[in-house]
Image (spheres, rainbow, N blue to C red):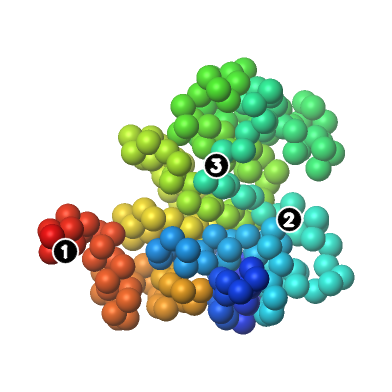
Amino acid sequence: MSAISIHGVTKSFGDNHVLRGIDLEVEPGQVVCLIGPSGSGKSTVLRCVNLLETPDEGTITVDGAELTDPDVDIDEVRRRIGLVFQQFNLFPHLTVLENCTIAQLKVLGRSAEEAEAKARINLRKVGLAEKEDSYPHQLSGGQQQRVAIARALSVDPQLMLFDEPTSALDPELVGDVLAVMRELADAGMTMLVVTHEMAFAREVADHVAFMDGGVIVEQGPAAQVIDTPQHPRTREFLRRVLHPTEVTLAED
């Protein structure tokens, strides 16, 4: 059974047809990366997977539960999903430790002792055990994003969704966040990742889907899609992303 199964999903915002029939499978333990230009619908796919956006048509199944079924217990399904956004969305008035325990206390009903123990385990995983008493404003952007990952892990998700988790970071901070994601992948976490980091997609993803204009233009094994793309639009996108200087010189 697929961890995530997306079939025929469409989504419009007024006259803007953002998704035009998406089909995608994510198997347990797989890392699947969505790549493509801004505005191609990648983040909307991710938001549909836990019904932050409701598809107009099609079906989405997560771990056997059909999210598009009106009778589904969406809160129960969401407990299985960790979500990390572009922005860190930490509570500024709470310490790092408190940010990593609040959902455990309020959603899972864990005791404070159990929640803090779980949070500390995950802060160690992301290399921030010594920052548990710090507040978000005392951390770098990369550190805040790693706290956001620790927070998501602390509710014991069965799969993780990452929506361009490094796009708001200074370039020198990107590596620390990607290293944490690599470790999660190595540990067998199921991950659906929207990213512009082609090296990460090439090295870590099992499967890559290239989106443009609200459709998946091409998908397959990461090395195949990134190294030997078959569709002209995929080739053009990757040429511009991987060799931007050459593209600029050619246009000049």
What is the C-alpha distance between the residues marked 2 and 3?
A: 19 Å
> Total number of numbered labels?
3
Which residue carries the number 1 mark?
251
- Tell me the amino acid under the disc marked 3: Gln
Q: Residue at x 64, y 50 (%)?
A: 82
The quadrant of the image that shows the N terminus is bottom right
Q: Residue at x 42, y 78 (%)?
A: 217
Circle 1/circle 2 CB separation < 8 Å: no
Which residue carries the number 3 mark?
87
Residue toward you, 104 or 183: 104
| Residue 67 place in picture, x, y as percent | 74, 69
Question: Which secondary structure lies at badge 2?
Answer: helix
Where is 124 relative to 228, above or below? above
Where is 71 relative to 190, above or below? below
Where is 219 relative to 127, above or below? below
Q: Going from the N terminus, do you reach mark 1 or mark 2 first?
A: 2
- Crowd around label 1: few <14 · some 14–19 · many ≥20 (10 Å): few
- Tell me the amino acid under the disc marked 2: Arg
Residue 69 in sight in this render: yes
Question: Which secondary structure lies at badge 3?
Answer: loop
Question: Which secondary structure lies at badge 1?
Answer: helix
Direction right: furthest residue: 71
Q: Is residue 206 left or right of residue 1?
A: left
Q: Indicate the quadrant where residue 173 lies.
A: top left
Q: Going from the N terminus, do you reach mark 3 or mark 1 first?
A: 3
- Tell me the amino acid under the disc marked 1: Glu
Which residue carries the number 2 mark?
78
